Amino acid sequence: MADFQVVVADPDSGATYQTEVSGQDANRFLGRDLGDEVDGSAVGLDGFTLELTGGSDAAGRPMRADVSGPNLKEILSTGGVGHKTTRDGERKRITVRGRRVSDETVQINAKVVSGSGDVAAAFGEADEDDE
């Protein structure tokens, strides 16, 4: 059974929240592609919708949206996820994981795209300004 570390970004506040998911909640992510929307109740955000934006495997290889499937692939990259160019025209062969979430995925990045309420309160983190 898969276990994931899910990093949820709240675009309204700019904050990120990390949570572990396992069991039935983790199964909601299996087989999904980057860009797909998932019900937020899988990470404790009832009433919210999350969009999958990225992730990585146990070795730290990033997922790329332009590589199909869940497998490893060596690509010749001119920049983007997994490769930062340092000069014009630079290309580099890198190993990346495909866009589909699988058992090999360890971390999933997601952002809140819809829902009403406070994301920080849903994760149990109160505002320090209110104290």
Image: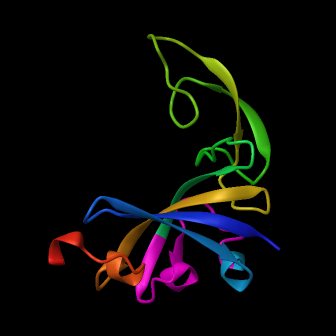
The tally of labels here is: 0
Residue 48 seen from this side:
yes
Residue closer to the observer: 49 or 109: 109
Q: What stretch is highlighted in magenta?
A: 28-50
Residue in front for this viewpoint, 105 or 77? 105
Q: In the image, is 28 to the left or to the right of 85?
A: right
Residue appearing at x 70%, y 57% in the figure: 106
* Quadrant placement of the C terminus: bottom left
For the rendered model, the colour scheme is rainbow
Residue 117 is situated, as x and y percent measured from the top left of the image, at 29, 85
Does residue 31 appear in the picture of this structure?
no
Residue 39, given in percent of the width and then of the height, sits at 52, 82
Task: Relative to 94, say whether 86 is above or below.
Answer: above
Name of the residue lying farthest toward the right: 1
Question: Does residue 31 belong to the magenta stretch?
Answer: yes
Identified at 40% across, 81% down, the residue is 124
Vertical arrangement, residue 63 with respect to residue 102, above or below:
above
Residue 103 in the image: state x and y as whole percent: 79, 63
Query: Residue 111 magenta-drawn?
Result: no
Q: In this view, does 118 lie to the left or right of 90?
A: left
Is 58 placed above or below 17 here?
above
Residue drawn 33% across the image and 82% down it:
121
- Residue 98 vs residue 18, the one in the foreground: 18
Please report the residue visible at 64 percent of the width from the left and 74 percent of the height from the top.
Answer: 21
Residue 34 sits in quarter? bottom right
Q: Farthest residue toward the bottom?
A: 47
Quarter of the image that includes the N terminus: bottom right
Q: Position of residue 107 (x, y in %)?
A: 63, 57
- Is 39 displayed left or right of 59 in the figure? left
